[in-house]
Amino acid sequence: MKRTLLLFFFILILSDFSTAQQQATYAQYMFNGLAINPAYAGSHGALSATALIRYQSVGVPGAPNTQTISAHSPLNNEKVALGMLIIHDKIGVIDQVGVNAIYAYRLFLSSNNDSPKVLSFGLQAGFSTYRAEYSQLDIYHPTDPSFTQDITQTMPAFGFGIYYYSDKFYAGLSAPNLMYNVFDRGEELETIVQSNPIILNSGYVFTLSRLMKLRPNFLLKLLDQKVVELDLNANISFDDVLWLGVSYQVSSSVNLLAEVQITNQLRIGYSYAFRTSTINRVDLGSHEFMINYRFKYPKSGVVTPRHF
């Protein structure tokens, strides 16, 4: 009976995160823009590296977990920026790794270095490796052909994005994967089609006082012309050092966020999410850890606080 209940909850989690497995979900997307939009490359004005680890639905066997490593920097010709992104996403016996190289071309719409207005166009290209070890599942009928054939395939990946930002506002539109990749399981079994989501996100910074700022954000993810994720977020900053926020993923979960600018170059972040559905009786929440480091500053040596 216990194994049956665990399997039931696992199926619920799997169905709820089926799109997340193919396009990972992040609570700290406003601080980790390269993971969802290649046009974000170069926006930090320096060589910037980010590592993120996310454990979803802790306490549920086979729940999703995601790791990303990204880096990006403008070149000497500041109109061009390059980057790289590695994503490892796992749910149950399904494991996916994506590796992408990123190119961004930026149009500077303002000559004011203290308040830049930039429109960036980004492309990313690479590959995605999909592995499903169905034979490792403990099933009632071990000879069921649906679970005896493992899958390991590598497919090309290509995406694009548009990103506009100033010192107080940003907006992005991206399609991280445009390839219609199909993972063939043979004539008698259902094929697996990789999702191709479209992501729209934006945010604005309101100055409340000399030391406090309010920044609302939102993220909308579309898949097959349907909304599969809507995240509404608000952060408050204290002296551009500490950010505290809360997000609501509609009909899914509530996220509590904290970001700390430890030095001018080092920023760390943490998010805790708890589900709003009835499955939270076995779901102990989700944890997301992020660290970002900026290696080099502009020649002037003046560091502009990063709100995005």
Image: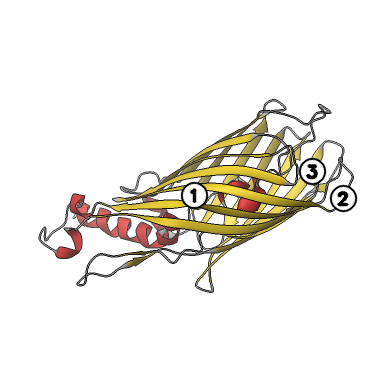
Pointer 2 and pointer 3: residues touching (CB < 8 Å)?
A: no
Whether residue 183 is visible here, answered yes or no, is yes
x, y percentage for residue 98?
A: 44, 49
Q: Residue at x 51, y 58 (%)?
A: 158
> Hey, which quadrant is residue 243 in on the image?
top right
The answer to whether residue 51 is left or right of residue 3 is right
Crowd rating for badge 2 (residues with CA inside 10 Å; few <14, some 14–19, many 20+): few
- Farthest residue to the front: give it: 77
Pointer 3 and pointer 1: residues touching (CB < 8 Å)?
A: no
Per the image, the residue denoted by label 2 is 110
Q: Amino acid at mark 1?
A: Phe
Quadrant, the C terminus? top right
Per the image, the residue denoted by label 3 is 213
Q: How is the image coloured?
A: secondary structure
Q: Which circle's residue, 2 or 3, is located before the other in the chain?
A: 2
* Relative depth, front residue between 120 and 145: 120
Classify mark 1: helix, strand or loop.
strand
